[in-house]
Image (spheres, rainbow, N blue to C red):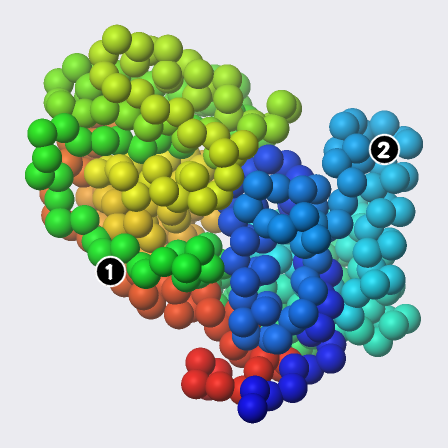
């Protein structure tokens, strides 16, 4: 007879940076939907997100009409919709990502904290990173909220250190990125690491970044020119085809413009496939497994490649990228600078990925086990062999 699940985990409301047409964030939802049912015994997890390809319609609770604009009516509808979801929930879960970097005075996190205090329902955070904070005011507000969260699983040691310095009083676990459980959540075994390119033609997977709010325009342009030019130079010299992944298709924050620039630059030079967030998490995962090497700016493009056993390089446009590379022990020979200087540097790196058999120090299986601890070490986790 299976153990009775803790009532607080029965109907979690999972919140995050959702509804922005981002494959990485949608992957958090896919994993959390599976993991809360598996490890917490949740009966009806609901995501504060509009409908998405990879989840049942009953699992997403936000009306897509509230994502049309930032107008006052749409913002009010968005807040009221979340308030209704809160009333039906047994707890609040911050599900993955860099959700604890910035917080304004009217942030919805205050709503979640108030709900938790008044209802007595717990708050949790799984697979999150904390900081670097965008301002001292944001840091102060976020630390105030975080101190009220009962359980936090962070995805990197840097986040754990920030919480420890802040005197976080709850249960803190240095776990891992939720995407580490993606193959299992999709019902698949972990792919084996690629033994190296051995076919007639190799396939390069690429994710680019459409908007970088923390870099100067000249840096953004120089980096984009270097990455696009480096890929073009590679396919002129080596038998390589390309899959362009647009991991974010949001009209304002997304990657489709730069992805189309790369596709157009490769037209007639090689076989080019294009896969986007609209195709869903599983479609992007399936295509990533078909690649032989990767060039990524999107963090979860690199995470997908790593899990698929594909050699990759990641342009560390934010600290979270360096934190991930440090966590997995990425070989130094496969690390690029934040702004590659020219296409030659990029082409050399990609050629190295084709012929160098170096691999990250951390195994994919260990990465998955760290991700699992976001759930198995929570106070309301079901007893079982996966819980310490």
Q: Is residue 119 left or right of residue 153?
A: right
Q: Residue 218: x percent and y percent?
A: 47, 17
Q: Is residue 270 above or below residue 192?
A: above
Q: Residue 53: x percent and y percent?
A: 57, 41
Q: Is residue 336 left or right of residue 299?
A: left
The residues tagged by marks 1 and 2 sit, at their Cα atoms, a distance apart of 47 Å
Q: Is residue 383 left or right of residue 301?
A: right
Which quadrant would the N terminus be assigned to in this image?
bottom right
- Secondary structure category for the residue under label 1: loop
Taking the spot 43% from the left edge, 39% from the top edge, the residue there is 283
Identify which residue, 92 or 90, lies in the foreground: 90
Q: Residue 371: x percent and y percent?
A: 46, 65
The residue wearing badge 1 is 361
Taking the spot 34% from the left edge, 40% from the top edge, the residue there is 288
Dot 1 alpha-carbon crowd within 10 angstroms: few under 14, some 14 to 19, many 20 or more: few
Of all residues, the one furthest to the top in this rendering is 268
Which numbered disc flags the more N-terminal residue, 1 or 2? 2
One can see residue 264 in this view:
yes
Identify which residue, 64 or 117, lies in the foreground: 64
Q: How many marks?
A: 2
Q: Is residue 108 left or right of residue 214?
A: right
Q: Quadrant of residue 51?
A: top right
Identify which residue, 303 or 152, lies in the foreground: 303
Q: Quadrant of residue 225?
A: top left
Taking the spot 54% from the left edge, 63% from the top edge, the residue there is 34
Q: Residue 37: x percent and y percent?
A: 59, 69
The residue wearing badge 2 is 74
Of all residues, the one furthest to the bottom in this rendering is 1
- Mark 2 and mark 1 in contact (Cβ < 8 Å)? no
Dot 2 alpha-carbon crowd within 10 angstroms: few under 14, some 14 to 19, many 20 or more: some
- Secondary structure category for the residue under label 2: helix
């Amino acid at each position: 007879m299976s153990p009775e699940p803790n009532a607080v985990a029965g109907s979690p409301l999972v919140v995050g940076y959702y509804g922005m047409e981002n494959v990485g964030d949608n992957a958090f939802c896919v994993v959390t939907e599976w993991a809360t049912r598996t490890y917490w015994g949740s009966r009806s997890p609901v995501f504060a997100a509009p409908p998405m390809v990879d989840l049942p319609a009953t699992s997403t609770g936000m009306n897509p009409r509230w994502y049309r604009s930032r107008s006052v009516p749409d913002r009010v509808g968005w807040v009221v919709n979340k308030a209704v979801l809160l009333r039906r929930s047994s707890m609040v879960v911050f599900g993955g990502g860099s959700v604890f970097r910035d917080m304004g005075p009217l942030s919805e996190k205050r709503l979640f904290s108030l709900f938790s205090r008044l209802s007595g329902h717990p708050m949790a955070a799984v697979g999150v990173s904390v900081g670097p904070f965008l301002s001292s005011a944001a840091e102060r507000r976020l630390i105030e909220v975080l101190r009220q969260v009962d359980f936090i699983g962070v995805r990197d040691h840097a986040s754990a250190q920030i919480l420890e310095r802040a005197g976080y009083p709850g249960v803190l676990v240095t776990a891992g990125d939720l995407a580490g459980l993606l193959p299992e959540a999709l019902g698949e075994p972990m792919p084996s690491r690629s033994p190296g390119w051995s076919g007639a033609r190799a396939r390069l997977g690429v994710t680019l970044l459409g908007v970088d709010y923390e870099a100067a325009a000249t840096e953004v342009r120089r980096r984009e020119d270097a990455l696009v030019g480096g890929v073009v130079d590679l396919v002129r010299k080596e038998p390589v085809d390309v899959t362009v992944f647009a991991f974010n298709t949001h009209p304002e924050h997304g990657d489709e413009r730069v992805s189309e620039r790369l596709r157009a630059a490769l037209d007639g030079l090689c076989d080019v496939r294009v896969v986007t967030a609209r195709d869903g998490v599983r479609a992007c995962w399936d295509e990533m497994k078909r690649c032989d090497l990767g060039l990524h700016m999107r963090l979860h493009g690199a995470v997908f490649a790593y899990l698929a056993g594909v050699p990759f390089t990641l342009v560390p446009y934010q600290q979270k990228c360096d934190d991930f590379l440090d966590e997995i022990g990425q070989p130094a020979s496969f690390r690029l600078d934040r702004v590659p200087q020219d296409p030659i540097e990029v082409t050399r790196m990609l050629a190295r990925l084709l012929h160098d058999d170096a691999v990250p120090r951390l195994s994919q299986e260990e990465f998955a086990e760290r991700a699992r601890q976001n759930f198995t070490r929570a106070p309301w986790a079901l007893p079982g062999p996966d819980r310490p």
